[in-house]
Amino acid sequence: MFEHLTPERVAKITGGKYIGDDRSRSVHVTGAVRDNRDVSPGNLFVCIRGERADGHDFANSAYKAGASCCLAERLIPGAAGPYVLVDSTLSALKTLAAGYRRQFMIPVVGVTGSVGKTSAKEMTAAVLGEKYRVLKTQENLNNEIGVPLTLLSLDELHEAAVIEMGISDFGEMSRLAAMVRPDICIMTNIGYSHLKELGDLEGVLRAKSEIFAYMNADGAAILNGDDTLLRGYDPGVRKITFGTGPRNDVRAENIRAESTDAVTCDIVSNLARCGDARFSARIPAYGKHLTMAALAAAATGRLLGMTDEETRRGILSYIPTEGRSAVIKTGYLTLINDCYNANPNSVAAALGSLSALPGRRVAILGDMLNLGAQSAALHRETGAFAARSGVSCLISCGEEAGYIREGYLNCGSPGANAAGPVPDAEKTSAHFKTIAELISALPAMLRRDDFVLVKASHSMHFSEIADYIPDRFSADHLA
């Protein structure tokens, strides 16, 4: 039976001390936030001490905005409402979320992996939304603060939840999974991310696979069967593989890109206990790599009793998130803004999608961070992959990105990608130390009808480039 949170129940679950009048003990608490500017009536405001600000200083602003209670680790002088005093708000937040989640007997899907988590989360939520009322992680709130805030948004109307789970070190997945307790786990791949902390691909797998110790024993792991490490991995629960390879339980055939507008494919399922199926799907967004997200979502839907038609409609309703493979047609050229973040796997996926487009392809690439001792080699391989993928013009920027250009120029081997390699005589490239220098050189490097990919790690601020191109290279501006 569903039981609403109240300040008194928050205190009980967290082991904290309730401070306030008796009337406020039993008011409903609906959801939780950490920023007083995000408060909606009934929210729990979590006071967190940050490097630049202390949430306790904004408690009364939160009450004014409608917060029903605060979670605090120090006294709040002149508090305009009730609060629960705990030793650590961060620890108490996780304890509260774990306790609250236990009362929900709905299917909970945990989504993790090195690349494609957000796309898989959005696609899965879109598919499940055709049958269920779904709670999903908003934006990229996938860490040890975002995950509990998401779980505390559950209410009695939700029939399923899709929770994105991101980590950067050992132990983090255990702490996340202890709260989420997923019935289904989607693992998109094991790639070159956070190598400074995790060491190598085997380390990435060990860190990600901590999730399986906290899964429902009757649940299922939906794993990328095209990934070498995941293909042979035993998660200890029912295993379902997805991918383009013929041995996957759910696979894509006849993948076709409709320029930058959509990707179509046939989805084939051979799932024990679920029967066989085949249907055509259309993903209304740019990027052949989105096929993998559609497969993971289709596998999840099939496990939860959805029909092929429901799954097809859900995939068709998918909307890409901002800054991730967003296509902007300026009237002069086509920009593919994928500068939210980058690692070798996500850049390879972006280049693979770029290779399917007709015409001249330009890749503006920057540093991929946190790659540890393998950084130079991985940047060189990314450049070589760009050459094999048919990139005609490679523009790089950043300390490490110089290795991308080096790999691009030194790649002489033919590629298996749709576009094929570009002859050396037709390849152009340039490297810049700063974004300002790069931007100033673009008018001489970009041409009409180019397809231009912009991608780098988030802290490289390549959004400045992505913002500049539609303004400078528009049909109106250049007419």
Image (spheres, helix red, strand yellow):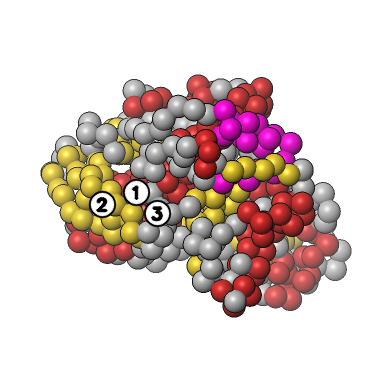
Provide the residue designation for mark 2: 265
Give the Cα distance between marks 3 and 1. 20 Å
Label 2 neighbourhood size at 10 Å, few (<14), some (14-19), many (20+)?
many
Which amino acid does the dot numbered 3 rest on? Pro
Q: Is residue 250 above or below residue 338?
A: above
Looking at the image, which residue is at 63% across and 36% down? Answer: 405
Give the Cα distance between marks 2 and 3. 19 Å
Among the two numbered marks 2 and 1 on one chain, the one whose residue lies closer to the N terminus? 2
Which amino acid does the dot numbered 2 rest on? Cys
Label 1 neighbourhood size at 10 Å, few (<14), some (14-19), many (20+)?
many
Residue placed furthest toward the right:
77
Among the two numbered marks 2 and 3 on one chain, the one whose residue lies closer to the N terminus? 2
Among the two numbered marks 3 and 1 on one chain, the one whose residue lies closer to the N terminus? 1
Q: Is residue 370 above or below residue 262?
A: above
Provide the residue designation for mark 3: 358
Q: Is residue 399 magenta?
A: yes
Seen in the image, is 316 located left or right of residue 426?
left
Numbered circle sitting on residue 291: 1
The part of the chain drawn in magenta is 393-410
Q: How far across and down, in percent of the image, does residue 80 sit?
A: 78, 72
Q: How far across and down, in percent of the image, does residue 17 sit?
A: 71, 53
Seen in the image, is 442 located left or right of residue 450?
right
